[in-house]
Amino acid sequence: MLLLYFTSPLGIETMIKAYISTYVVSLFYWHYQAYKLIGISLKDIVFDVFPYAVITALSLGSAWLLTAAIHSVYLLFIGRVLLMGSIYITLLWLANCAILKESLSFLRNKES
């Protein structure tokens, strides 16, 4: 927060760049600490996250393309949120994703 205070006279764009830079540096610091504690490498993390990032990008792009003709801001928001969620869950289901199945199992057991 102190960094944002000192960069505020320079404008919002500078504040955003400073925040993102600080976040990236801290991310690598925390990864280094995790590596020291449990031995997980940056490559392992990237390989774990990459499939979900691709599925998210496909869902986002599909929802954006399919709702591009909607002009009402409210309908556009609702349509994109519902469509992206539906596409994301469908792609995870088709990919036989363990996290989705575990989450659904947890929700089913919690309702009982």
Image (spheres, helix red, strand yellow):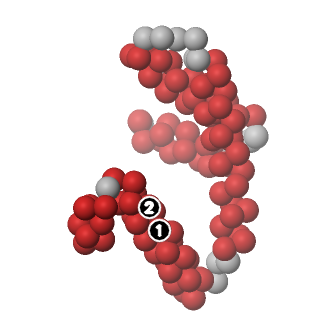
Give the residue at mark 2.
17
Residue 33 at what x, y percent from top left?
Answer: 52, 84
Q: What amino acid is found at the position of numbered circle 2 in the picture?
A: Lys
Label 1 neighbour load within 10 Å: few <14, some 14-19, many 20+: few
In the foreground, 70 or 89:
70
Residue 21 showing in the rendered view: yes
Please tell me which residue is depicted at 65% across the width and 31% down the height of the picture. Answer: 61
Residue 111 at what x, y percent from top left?
Answer: 41, 36
Residue 112 at what x, y percent from top left?
Answer: 42, 36
The alpha-carbon separation of the residues under discs 2 and 1 comes to 6 Å
Relative to 11, does residue 31 appear above or below in the rendering? below
Residue 45 at what x, y percent from top left?
Answer: 66, 67
The label shown at residue 73 is none
Residue 23 showing in the rendered view: no
Relative to 82, does residue 95 appear above or below in the rendering? below
Q: Mark 2–mark 1 contact, CB under 8 Å?
A: yes
Q: What amino acid is found at the position of numbered circle 1 in the picture?
A: Ser
Instruction: Quadrant for the N terminus, please.
Output: bottom left
In the foreground, 76 or 101:
76
Give the residue at mark 1.
21
